[in-house]
Image: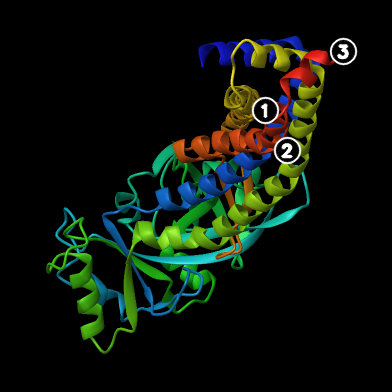
Amino acid sequence: MASLFSYSLRNMLARRLTTALTVGGMALVVFVFAAMLMLSEGLRATLVLTGSPDNVVVLRQGAKSEMESSVDRDQAPLVESLPQVARAADGGPLAARELVVLITLNKRGTTKPSNVVIRGIGPHSLELRSQVRLKEGRMPRFGTSEIIAGESIARRFSGTGIGESLRFGLRDWTVVGIFEAGATGFSSEVWGDVDQLMAAFRRSSYSVVVARMNERDGSEGRGGLAGLRAGLAADPRLQLEGKRETRFYEEQSEMMAKFLGVLGTMLPAIFSLGAIIGAMITMHAAVANRVREIGTLRAIGFQRRDILRAFLMESLLLGGSGGAIGLLLASTLQLVTISTMNFQTFSELAFSFSLSPRIAVWSLLFGTGMGCLGGILPAIKASRLVIVDALRAA
């Protein structure tokens, strides 16, 4: 086996140009394949990381997003009074009533508008989101028209830097701080006092109530998520449901992630046909140019299966090399941040490509599979050559 591997490797090196072109074609296909999967994974990871496993989001029954949900003013205190809601340091409920609305802002240096999420927050909102940290400036004072912007928004949209102002809801709002939220969706939001925003947008109800649960796990105990859901269902005044925050935001990514996943499978599948044909042509040419070598190998004792293995090994090396190079190129995309529309909220969401071990394995298998499919027929042809005919070849 070692001698066959050495033989295959030396033949690849002897045909450098042909090998490079074949490997390059496969690498480009694997690059597209890995990039689409990384795009889907990056979107999913961004939205999942937005939530905390300790928190529960209470929203209207049947609502799929915060934009569709409404929690009446008289319902919010009832939710906060449930025994499953943890207590804050001041003895009150560790919960926040929040409002989510969309506004249109122009991107910096252009007149191109895009939707941006405005989130009305309560005094405990920052405490409930441990991934959010004030980066510059200060927090907005409640009862005023002050706002803070996520760093992704401040970097890309006009009027969202510290000291700048925005006009929406028939008011002028002053940006007093910039916050960072890591690789989460909060970086693409603007925050302000929930009561001031409700007045500005003439809203009579909140979008959701976010609360910290007494227990982190989803047990059936009184303090768990199941207990909170039972408490909501038992009160006829509440037509609400509770979801763990991580699960809630994961659902937001499912539609877009599925679309990118299907696209990431179909496009490389089409492109891979060309790469497989290229590998097949390369291996057929290798068989045609090495007929005498094959005859010599057979004459000195190598069996048909050994010839088959040698040429299959060569094609697998081509595919594996292309897969590794394509994956390496795709890994550099992790340095790139892009933005797209969130299909659930119709707002702009910034996120990065994310390379996971699962994507790396699938990419390498995809490249190796292309090599195998492209080399199987030429390898069979090489193994079936007759020794005498092969030795007579010029």
Disc number lying in front (1 or 2): 1
Q: Is residue 242 above or below residue 238?
A: above
Q: Residue 394 has which mark?
A: 3
**Mark 1 burial class by Cα count in 10 Å: few <14, some 14-19, many 20+:** many
Where is residue 380 shown, x and y percent of the image? 68, 33
Would residue 370 be found to the left or right of residue 211 on screen? right
Distance of label 1 from label 2 (alpha carbons): 20 Å
CB under 8 Å between callouts 3 and 2? no
Where is residue 62 shown, x and y percent of the image? 43, 79
Does residue 225 appear in this view?
yes
Q: Is residue 295 above or below residue 41?
A: above
Where is residue 15 shown, x and y percent of the image? 77, 14
Which kind of residue does numbered mark 2 sit on? Ile
- Secondary structure beneath disc 1? helix
Farthest right residue in view: 394
Q: Earlier in the sequence, mark 3 or mark 2?
A: 2
Foreground residue among 162 and 319: 319
- Secondary structure beneath disc 3? loop
Foreground residue among 35 and 13: 13
